[in-house]
Image (spheres, grey):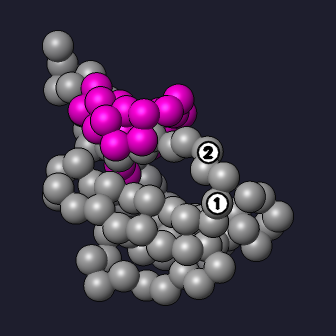
Amino acid sequence: MSEKNNCALLVQTQYAKQFGQHQLLVKSPGRINLIGEHTDYNLGFVLPAAIDKAIYIAVGKRADDTICLSAADLDQSIEANLESLQPSNLQWPNYLFGIADQLKKNGYK
């Protein structure tokens, strides 16, 4: 089994063990900017490229306003409430808290 398939399987297995419900598995490739750091939104030139690193995220529905995050590679977990999101000292959850906050602000539950 390839390393990429191992990562996906690890995320799916951990999610099922922790939450025991159906999940949506999402993969997002890593990228680098060969030129143009922070110029894309200023109409400048950019040259991004995908790399062989990726993030895998398993997502499932909840009936409450709690966000439960778990980082398989760091063996860390955190819970937060959508109504009172605050940055975490762990740092890695903050990217996902930002996504959740933007989804909430745009009317998604």
Instruction: Give the residue displayed 22% in from the left and 62% down from the top.
Output: 76
Along the horizontal axis of the image, is 84 left or right of 36?
Answer: right
Please name the residue that numbered disc 1 is placed on. 64
Please name the residue that numbered disc 2 is placed on. 61
Instruction: Give the residue displayed 43% in from the left and 53% down from the top.
Output: 48
Count of labels in the image: 2
Of 35 and 76, the residue lying toward us: 76
Labelled disc at residue 11: none
- Which element carries disc 2, helix, strand or loop? loop
Q: CA distance from mark 2 to mark 1?
A: 9 Å
**Residue 74, position as x, y percentages in the image:** 17, 58
Residue 16 vs 64, above or below: the answer is: above
Q: Nearer the viewer, mark 2 or mark 1?
A: 1
Instruction: Give the residue displayed 17% in from the left and 56% down from the top.
Output: 75
Q: Give residue 35's quadrant in the image.
A: bottom left
Classed neighbour count for the residue bearing mark 1: other residues with Cα under 10 Å, few (<14), some (14–19), many (≥20): few
Please give the range of residues in magenta: 9-31
- Which element carries disc 1, helix, strand or loop? loop
Image quadrant in which the N terminus is located:
top left
Q: Give residue 100's quadrant in the image.
A: bottom right
Instruction: Give the residue displayed 29% in from the left and 30% down from the top.
Output: 13
Q: Is residue 43 visible?
A: yes
| Residue type pointed to by label 1 | Asp
Residue 103 on the magenta span:
no
**Residue 22, position as x, y percentages in the image:** 53, 29
